[in-house]
Amino acid sequence: MANFNVKYPTIAKMLHSYLTFTKRRNNIHCRIKNTVQKVFDWKIYTQMNHNDMEQFLIVLSDFPFFDSLSEADKMALFKRFWMPFSLLERIYDTLNNLDSTQFLDGNFIVLQNGSIFELDELTKSSNLEEMEKITFNSWKTLLPLKKKLNPHCIEVMYIFCCILWNSSYLDIPLSEAGDEIVRRGRLIIHKEMREFYNYDEIQWERIYALRHILVVTEDCIKEHGKNIA
């Protein structure tokens, strides 16, 4: 971690913020290990997701460049950031916490409280609300992509940073000063990823796979947006 702080300080800060966030979350929820559930309670999931949102906004408050934005720009950017981040983070958290070959080889999702659900079972239910369908299908789409790439934690934090700084997606209105801060934030994380790949063009090819995951994630959010509209 110390080496990350020196070589990739901004992305390492996202990692530090994320670890702080997960520690706080684990203090709130008493996780049940390797227990497959049959009944998905959407209300409980929504509340856990809301708690996550509040906690992550707190830990993000001193993130480089984000801390320099006006309050209005922070809220506009965070509002756009949260949905794609929460979808992708649920996949990352799942793969970090499934400690059995049975689950890793399957198609499972882990919730914040440790409950495990089989995604095929969730998606084939006939009485789902539209938002439940979109969420479950998004998880089912993203999980194999993340498994196949098996990204390093720095690569995952890079995706999280990209989601944060992608202000053009959904045309989030920022002030002129905010646009400039976000532009500089994007340049820094791309430079740090070049350093992470040791300026090796072959390794750099992984960046396209990472960005594909980002695009797929944000396409899933477009489905959310259509449903809300």
Image (tube, rainbow, N blue to C red):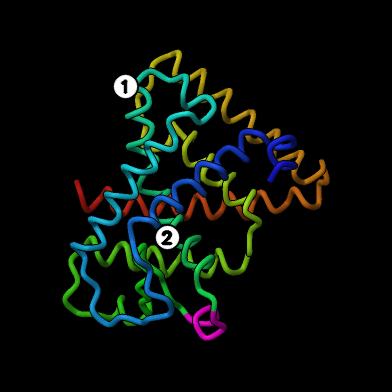
Residue 72, label in figure: 1
Instruction: Answer left or right for 214 relative to 45.
Output: right
Front one among 55 and 126? 55
Q: Secondary structure at mark 2?
A: helix
Label 1 neighbourhood size at 10 Å, few (<14), some (14-19), many (20+)? few
Label 1 secondary element = helix
In the rendered structure, which segment of residues is drawn in magenta? Answer: 100-106
- Tell me the distance, in whole angstroms, between the alpha carbons under discs 1 and 2: 27 Å
Rendered location of residue 55, percent (x, y): 35, 43
Give the image location of residue 86, x and y in percent.
Answer: 39, 52
Q: Are marks 1 and 2 in contact (CB under 8 Å)?
A: no
**Along the line of sight, which residue is nearer the eye, 6 or 119?**
6
Residue 174 has which mark?
none
Measuring from the top left, give residue 24's x and y in whole percent: 40, 50
Residue that carries the numbered disc 2 in the rendered image: 90
Side of 130 where 185 appears, left or right: right
Q: Earlier along the polypeptide chain: callout 1 or callout 2?
A: 1
